[in-house]
Image (tube, helix red, strand yellow):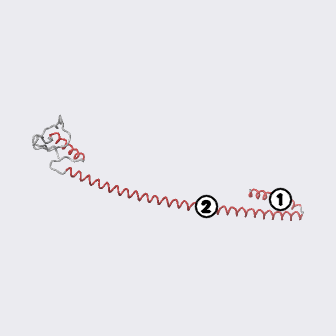
Amino acid sequence: MKRLYYADASPTPPSPPQNPSYGYPQDGDRSIGKLPTTLGAYWHHMITEEFMAVIEGAGLEPDENNLHQLADIFEDFRSRATASEQYKLAAEAAANRAEASANGVVTETAAKILEIQQAGNTQIAAIEAKESDVQDDIASALQQMESALSDYIDQLQAEGSSQSVAVVQQAQSLLAQIQSYASQAQS
């Protein structure tokens, strides 16, 4: 479409009518002398400019030999709208899949966290049980050492030699240290 007319076209656009008639077109009635609606040059100009704006807005050059430029533009628009709708549906489906996947990951992660917490609690309980056993073993060993040293001191005192007196003093010092460690371990 171009500004192409059969004859007498003006190089400048027409001016709007001085006293326009607004409303809808009508055929008129000859029997009562009512004239039909007159379109006028400005009306043709408005329609042509609207069509050209659509064609040029689509990036095309108006062409008087192509009488389906508007139809091509509307078909392209319809195709793009359909493609956009398909992209939208595909994007929504992908978003739904991503959401479902994320929900699955969250659920799986929560289950793993719970599993790890339970395993950690089990290990803590086992360590605490072992700690109690180790403390009991230490206390038992300290008691055995105390008893053995006491027996050894008694034997040395019974012997009564001068050398045994020095050994008894060392043994009593060692016994005092063991008793100190034992009382610290209990507290």
Above or below: residue 95 compared with residue 38: below
The spot of residue 171 in percent (x, y) is: 82, 60
**Which tag, 1 or 2, sits closer to the chain's start?**
2
The residue sitting at 15% across, 47% down in the picture is 64
Above or below: residue 2 compared with residue 105: above
The spot of residue 174 in percent (x, y) is: 80, 59
Locate residue 76 relative to residue 182 in the image: left or right: left
Locate residue 65 relative to residue 182 in the image: left or right: left
Q: CA distance from mark 1 to mark 2?
A: 44 Å
Above or below: residue 54 compared with residue 101: above
Locate residue 108 relative to residue 158 in the image: left or right: left
In the image, what residue type sits under mark 2?
Asn
Residue placed under numbered mark 1 in the picture: 172
The kind of secondary structure element at disc 2 is helix
The spot of residue 184 in percent (x, y) is: 75, 56
Q: Which mark is residue 121?
A: 2
Picture quadrant where residue 158 is located:
bottom right
